[in-house]
Image (tube, rainbow, N blue to C red):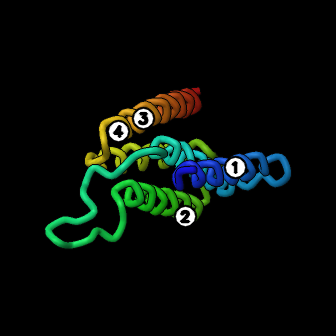
Amino acid sequence: MNKYRILAIVLILIGLALVSSYLLMPLIPLIAFGLSAIIMGLSCICLAGTESLLPAQNNGKTRAISTEAGFIISLGVAFALNDILTAATNQPEVAVYFIGLSLAFIVITLLHVNLIAWTRMKLDILGSFIFIAFLVMIVFKISQITT
């Protein structure tokens, strides 16, 4: 089994457990961390079965990590920073966390253009769904402000 597929299963299960923990203890930062894990897990599913486009040897120098691993690491760092900074400001709504997560996902995905075409297409489809959910959150926020 591919390492990204295993990571995806673990992240999605952890994310679902954290999101469902809202029934026991309604902690918004915990739910946001669960959403981060689910989005990262879905990203790992997109990366499963891919090979790096860049060669392992570049001018005699071996790369320390693959392009896909760099994508997952940068996505994890961006999501962690988003969750920590948003929790530090005591945001009471999950929508604020999700808006930050979706913007971070779109930016990180756009920065990693050297992934192979099939992987880029899968990540673009996932990004489209996240962007649609982002727009729905924005519409709900605007409707709450105007009423």
Tags 3 and 1 in contact by the CB under 8 Å rule?
no
- Secondary structure at numbered mark 2: helix
**Residue 28 coordinates in the image, percent (x, y):** 68, 52
What is the quadrant of the C terminus in the image? Answer: top right
| Residue, disc 2 | 84
Tags 4 and 3 in contact by the CB under 8 Å rule?
yes
| Residue, disc 3 | 122
Rounded to the nearest angstrom, the CA distance separating label 4 from label 3 is: 5 Å
- Secondary structure at numbered mark 4: helix
Q: Residue at x 25, y 55 (%)?
A: 54
Rounded to the nearest angstrom, the CA distance separating label 2 from label 1 is: 21 Å
Rounded to the nearest angstrom, the CA distance separating label 1 from label 4 is: 24 Å
Q: Residue at x 38, y 43 (%)?
A: 106
> Residue 13, which numbered label?
1
Rounded to the nearest angstrom, the CA distance separating label 2 from label 3 is: 28 Å
Q: Residue type at mark 2: give it.
A: Ile
Q: Residue type at mark 3: give it.
A: Lys
First along the sequence among labels 2 and 3: 2
Tags 1 and 4 in contact by the CB under 8 Å rule?
no
Residue 96 visible within the image: no
**Residue 80 coordinates in the image, percent (x, y):** 52, 62
First along the sequence among labels 4 and 2: 2
Q: Residue type at mark 4: give it.
A: Arg
| Residue, disc 4 | 120
- Secondary structure at numbered mark 3: helix
Q: Is residue 3 left or right of residue 122?
A: right
Q: Residue type at mark 1: give it.
A: Leu
Rounded to the nearest angstrom, the CA distance separating label 3 from label 1 is: 21 Å
How dense is the environment of label 4, judged by Cα within 10 Å: few (below 14), some, or many (20 and up)? some
Q: Is residue 96 above or below residue 82?
A: above
